Every structure is written in structure tokens, then in C-alpha cells.
Amino acid sequence: MTEPIIFAIPKGRILDEALPLMQAAGIEPEAAFFDDASRALLFATNNPAISIIRVRAFDVATFVAHGAAQIGIVGSDVIDEFDYSELYAPVDLGIGRCRISVAMPQGVPDDVNGGHIRVATKYPGTTSRYYHARGIQAECVKLNGAMELAPSLGLSGRIVDLVSSGKTLAENGLVETAVISQVSARLIVNRAAYKMMSGTIPAMVERFRELTGARAAA
Ligand SMILES: Nc1ncnc2c1ncn2[C@@H]1O[C@H](COP(=O)(O)OP(=O)(O)OP(=O)(O)O)[C@@H](O)[C@H]1O
Ligand SMILES: O=P(O)(O)OC[C@H]1O[C@H](OP(=O)(O)OP(=O)(O)O)[C@H](O)[C@@H]1O
């Protein structure tokens, strides 16, 4: 009997770009997946050996790292934040492109007084590592969204957040002062599942690799 495969995909903005890729890879969710009234969390696909779970972006990494899902799609921002050793990220899918950056209020000097700063972010791991490497102690205030409000309301002097067009920063009086890294969505696989399911999972990885390679070459 074929071992069941759970494919974890994020609810948010990557989903719209990920679905056509999955379809091209031969994975199509059942109708309930597209039904807004459905409260189901696990969905069958056209392939009886593959089910899909739709979870929050950070939880995709958690499900796959712990082997509760074997494969998934998630932004490299999330992979870097957790740094899970059980996650293997073999394919850059070239979707969900943005960057993770430091931003500050316009016109405020980028001074680090006494080597200590306070940063509002959804990414405390990435932020701490970034500043630690520069000899700066960063106190991170964890927020789950709307980081851009923090400087004007006195919560922090800086934020670390995702930037794409720069519109959100500009509309909130902030300027990007440093780029920490470029971000794109990756196919992620649980390392143990990759080794154990030596037929199916590596074949799926190869299929996504071919698809994204063909797209990049087109
Ligand atoms: N402005 C953007 N441009 C391109 N990609 C983005 C942008 N913002 C986020 N992403 C990518 O999409 C992923 C999910 O972001 P999204 O904003 O949909 O999540 P979220 O709504 O904050 O998630 P959740 O509600 O689960 O916490 C991010 O991890 C990142 O990889
Ligand atoms: O540079 P821009 O093109 O303006 O994009 C950046 C914004 O996109 C993301 O937020 P999102 O819209 O996903 O909202 P959320 O973080 O509150 O979920 C990110 O957190 C920024 O706020």
C-alpha cells in the first residue's frame, strides 16, 4: 500500500500562485477546498495518495518539520525564522517574491545608542541573528501584523518586516534602511520522509524542480 502524503500549503497570499504550480505538478484539490463555506482543514486531491492541509504560513513549517506533513510550500522568510534542522528546502519556486528589511521613520537618524535597540517584528529569530552578527543587542517586540504602526506609536524605533512594492512603508512614514535577505517561496520536505518515501517524495520534488526550471528558462 502507498503511504499517505500530507501536503501543507499556506492560507495567505502565496496560495494563489502556488495552486497553478501544484496543478501543473498534477495535484488538484477536491471541490470543498475552493468552497468558502467549508470548515474542513484537510482535503482530498485527485491523487488518492495525497491530501492537502491549508494552514497559516508559519504552521506549514511546523507541520513539515515535525513530520505531521511530509511536504509543503512556504516563504523562505518562514524557513529562515525557524531554522528547523528537519526541513529540507530543495526547490525555489520563484513565487511570493519580496524581501525582509529593516525600516525606520523617515528623517530619524539610524543611531544605535549603547549597542541596544528595540525592534517590532514577526521575525524575532531572524532579527536577533541579524543584529547579533553586527554586535548589536536587539530587543524584539513580537507582533503578528501591522508592524508599521510600532514606530509612530512609540512601541519601537525600528521594524523588521516584508517589503515588496514599498507602498506599506511609504504610507506609514517609514523608509527601508537595510535589506536583510531576499525572499521567495520554497518547496519544503521533511528530511526523514524524503529518505523513507524514496519513491514518491523525491519524484514530487523532481517534478516541481522541472516545472520551476522550465518556467525560469521560458
Ligand atoms: N508583500 C508581499 N509580497 C510578496 N510576498 C509576500 C508579501 N508579503 C508576504 N509574502 C509572502 O507570503 C507569505 C505569507 O504572507 P501573508 O501576508 O499571506 O501571511 P499572513 O497573512 O501574515 O499569515 P498569517 O495570517 O498566517 O500569519 C509570507 O511568509 C511571505 O513569504
Ligand atoms: O511593500 P508592500 O508591497 O506594501 O508589501 C508589504 C506588506 O505586505 C505584507 O503584509 P500583508 O499585506 O500580507 O498583510 P499582513 O502582514 O498584515 O498579513 C507585509 O507584512 C507588509 O505589510
Image (tube, helix red, strand yellow):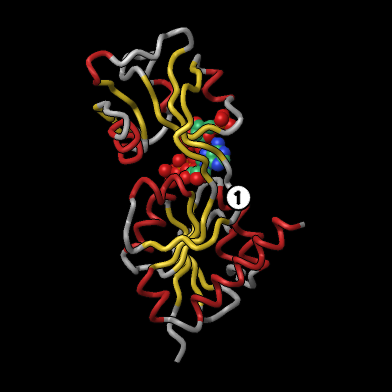
The residue nearer to you, when weighing 54 against 136, is 136
Disc 1 beta carbon < 8 A from ligand 1?
no
* Nearer to me, 180 or 186: 180
Instruction: Name the residue at the bottom extreme.
Output: 1
Image quarter where the C terminus lies is bottom right
Q: Residue at x 55, y 45 (%)?
A: 13
Q: Position of residue 88 (x, y in %)?
A: 42, 63
Q: Residues within 10 Å of mark 1 (few under 14, many from 20)?
A: some
Left or right: residue 97 compared with residue 130: right
Q: Position of residue 132 (x, y in %)?
A: 28, 33
Instruction: Answer whether residue 101 is visible to the viewer in this image.
Output: yes
Tell me residue 50's x, y (percent).
Answer: 51, 75
| Residue at left offset 44%, top offset 14% | 105
Q: Say whether residue 53 is visible.
A: no
Q: Which element type, helix, strand or loop, lies under badge 1?
A: loop
Looking at the picture, does residue 169 appear above or below residue 122?
above
- Judged left or right of residue 24, residue 32 is left
| Whether residue 124 is situated above or below residue 217 in the rendered picture | above
Residue at position x 64%, y 69% from top? 25
Instruction: State the count of labels.
Output: 1
- Residue 77 sits in quarter: top left
Q: Quadrant of residue 215?
A: bottom right
What residue is drawn where x is 40% and y is 9%?
A: 109
The amino acid type, in three-letter code, at marker 1 is Ile
Residue 93 picture location, percent across and down: 59, 56
Q: Circle 1 sits on which residue?
A: 95
